[in-house]
Image (tube, rainbow, N blue to C red):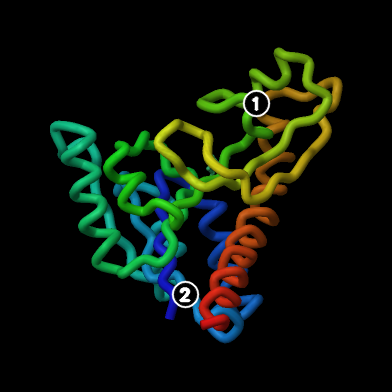
Amino acid sequence: MKNIVILISGGGSNMAAIVRATERDRWAERFGARIAAVVSNKAEAGGLALAAAHGIATEIVPHKEFPTREAFDEALAKVVDAHSPDLVVLAGFMRILTPGFVERYAGRLVNIHPSLLPAFPGLNTHQRAIDAGCKVAGVTVHQVTTELDHGPILAQAVVPVLPDDTAATLAGRVLAQEHQLYPRAIAGWLADTSRHIRKF
Ligand code: GRF
């Protein structure tokens, strides 16, 4: 069985979309894959209850309890590794990860970012797209490298920016696409690795 570990910090709507996809599209049968755990750096993350309701193990590693980023990442890696991850999925995980963490999961760490990378890495992407006069915006699923919001692009989706958009209305349009794109991108990754494994 391939184990997917999802890291969240908040509402977890992308995580929920991935959970729905694993059930609806029978990832266990098709790819031999399952969500092994959902891990949050915040105890109050809304997504934890949903994950638990679907029978998924949940873990909390509160970043505030660690003196340094390195100490937090080390504790996080320990919790993640306990679930033998084949793929680690960042889904609204709002902590910058240390190079050590990123390198440990090289090639099996993916992120979703609400802009058309390489445009607008970092925060406030929707307002920045509006301020720049962009006519389209969107979302990117990419492999994580040590440079923030960079790394090989796995999938993108585009939405229009409408004349009276606010950051909130644009974010809502993009988020609807995120919920389609992230499960599709992960399924694509799983299909690729299944093919690769079958070759040998
Ligand atoms: C999403 O827009 C995601 O792209 C960004 O943070 C937001 C998280 O939303 N990194 P949710 O927690 O998945 O609802």
| Label 2: element kind | strand
Residue 17: quarter of image? bottom right
| Quadrant in which the N terminus is drawn | bottom left
Q: Is residue 113 above or below residue 3?
A: above
Q: Nearer the viewer, residue 166 or 2?
A: 2
Q: Name the residue located 65 percent from the left edge and 26 percent from the top edge.
A: 119
User: Residue 66's x, y, as percent?
Assistant: 16, 38
Q: Amino acid at mark 2?
A: Arg
Q: Amino acid at mark 1?
A: Ala
Q: Is mark 2 within 8 Å of ligand 1?
A: no
| Residue 47 in view | no
Residue 141 is tagged as none
Q: Is residue 159 above or below residue 31?
A: above
User: Which residue is tagged 1?
Assistant: 119
- With 198 as the anchor, is 49 left or right in this view? left
- With 176 as the anchor, is 23 left or right in this view? left
User: Residue 113's x, y, as percent?
Assistant: 57, 39
Q: Name the residue located 51 percent from the left edge and 34 percent from the top edge.
A: 149
Q: Quadrant of ligand 1?
A: top right
Q: Earlier in the sequence, mark 1 or mark 2?
A: 2
Q: Mark 2, residues whose alpha carbon is within 10 Å: few (<14), some, or many (≥20)?
A: some
